[in-house]
Image: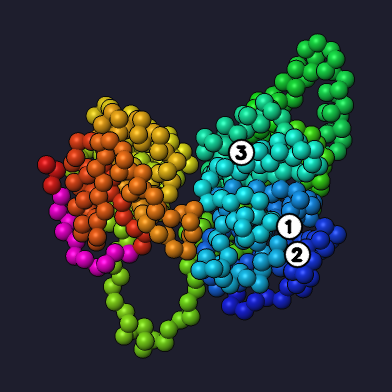
Amino acid sequence: MIEDLPTTRPASPLMDQLSSDLTLLGQLESHDLIRLADELRHDLLYAVAGTGGHFGAGLGVVELTVALHHVFNTPHDRIVWDVGHQTYPHKMLTGRRDRMSTMRQLEGLSGFPKRSESPFDTFGVGHSSTSISAAMGMALAAQKQGIDRKVIAVIGDGAITGGMAFEALAHAGHERPNMLVILNDNQMSIGHNTGGLATYFAKIWASKTYIALREGSKKLLEHVRGAWDLAKKTEEHMKGMVAPGTMFEELGWHYIGPLDGHDLPQLVSTLKIMSELKGPQFLHIRTIKGKGFAPAERDPIGYHAINKLEPAKPVSDAVVSAKPKAPKYQDVFGQWLCDLATQDDRVVGITPAMCEGSGMVQYASQFPDRFYDVAIAEQHAVTLAAGMACDGLKPVLAIYSTFLQRGYDQLIHDIALQDLDVTLAIDRAGLVGQDGPTHHGTFDLSYLRCIPNMVIGAPSDENQCRHMLQSAWLHEGPAAIRYPRGEGRGAPIDSSLSLH
């Protein structure tokens, strides 16, 4: 377990070999794969310390990344990563290790998968819940063209809460393409179902004996009227008693799991077996976000992403340059919301999985009965606010500009056309620098200005931000206040609030 980030690049002999020839990865034995995972984890810690960026998610999928590139013939076989926070190990294994120091910089590596950057980045992402749909499209394309290709989607337990993921799961269960979905459950979103019995049965379901018995029984019983349906339902009920896979089985997927996502030999053997199966396959693994770096394991939210580690300044320089920082716009919003809720019990705060980033932690703690985190479901968040506004509440929806795009139809149809009293606090408006084009909030002014009944504000400093938010909330109709990421200008803030 590592406590401190390395300041010098660790020795990585296996990584050095793979940098020149990735095909060697497929030839490594089990003990070498474990060594490689250890080297990759240390190298990742060093790289992110130098550049900043998403941190905990990549540490959690080191073993999975090694296993995928060992078992499958990438990039001919397609790996589609959801969101992309976890792809730094993938980038390092696929020829970009020496460019990691350019991560999230002008003309450097993207912090997310990017098709123009590498043939191993099969689909560009930045928003969540897209991987299953994209992978299904690739699987169907391979099928139509007669190409022998494996397609794998890797999705987290947060991203799978998005409605788009379930739409794809349902469609794939109907079309039955040859594809594999891997649910990386780092136990941040989906309820726990752990224990020795669950793990024991998961190993059985991933065994060659069980797979052969299942497929053989299917061929035999399909010719007996109703027999296979009865056998399949019996299997699903048995699985449902010890594992959370019944829902996926009902959607038409063959479910295996949950397995330990850090047990590299078991991952490799399971993936080899599942790669030979036809139809939609679903593998559920459990991982630890921040695995191998103790502070990140203890605080997975705080270490979701980190800033570049700067060298410590001499004490004399630090004293001279020390000055109070201006508040971040998200904190100005969070304080305003708390102050407002203290004075008016109609206030309701809504966010689609952006509590920390939107500055709502204090509000959620202080007003838990008036706080709704709807998970990664922007469309639902918008219409939920509309419904509340219909019946006497005054909802405030905190959302990043780039993610509001996903609820655009609901914004027009459910809020604006009905002239409902909803306040939108739009964070990360404008350019968002290092996060790249998928996270820039550059379209909101254009797509909001054409919507009827919408009032839009763009403050120039923190004080204007607070008072524009209050004006928007007092306006009896839809209103949106857009503000940038990061610190304000240091303007004095008038903290008074008028409720009229």
Instruction: State the residue position of label 1.
Output: 66
Q: Which residues are magenta?
A: 487-497
Instruction: State the residue position of label 2.
Output: 36
62 in relation to 146, above or below: below
- Of callouts 1 and 2, which one flags the residue occurring earlier in the amino acid sequence? 2
Mark 3 is on which residue type?
A: Ser
Indicate the position of residue 371 as horizontal and vertical percent values: 35, 41
Q: Nearer the viewer, mark 1 or mark 3?
A: 3
Q: Secondary structure at mark 3?
A: helix
Q: Main secondary structure of the magenta part?
A: loop
Instruction: State the residue position of label 3.
Output: 133
Q: CA distance from mark 1 to mark 2?
A: 8 Å
Query: Is residue 417 among what the camera can see?
Result: yes
Q: Secondary structure at mark 2?
A: helix
Task: Using the rendered view, name the quadrant where residue 176 is placed.
Answer: top right
400 in relation to 102, above or below: above
Q: Nearer the viewer, residue 400 or 349?
A: 400
Query: Is residue 422 among what the camera can see?
Result: no
Q: Are marks 1 and 2 in contact (CB under 8 Å)?
A: yes
Q: Nearer the viewer, residue 239 or 167?
A: 167
Q: CA distance from mark 3 to mark 2?
A: 31 Å
Within 10 angstroms of label 2, few (less than 14), some, or many (20 or more) residues? many
Task: Say if the magenta span includes residue 324.
Answer: no
- Seen in the image, is 262 located left or right of residue 191? right
- Seen in the image, is 133 located left or right of residue 31? left
Q: CA distance from mark 1 to mark 3?
A: 24 Å
Q: Nearer the viewer, mark 3 or mark 2?
A: 3
Within 10 angstroms of label 3, few (less than 14), some, or many (20 or more) residues? many
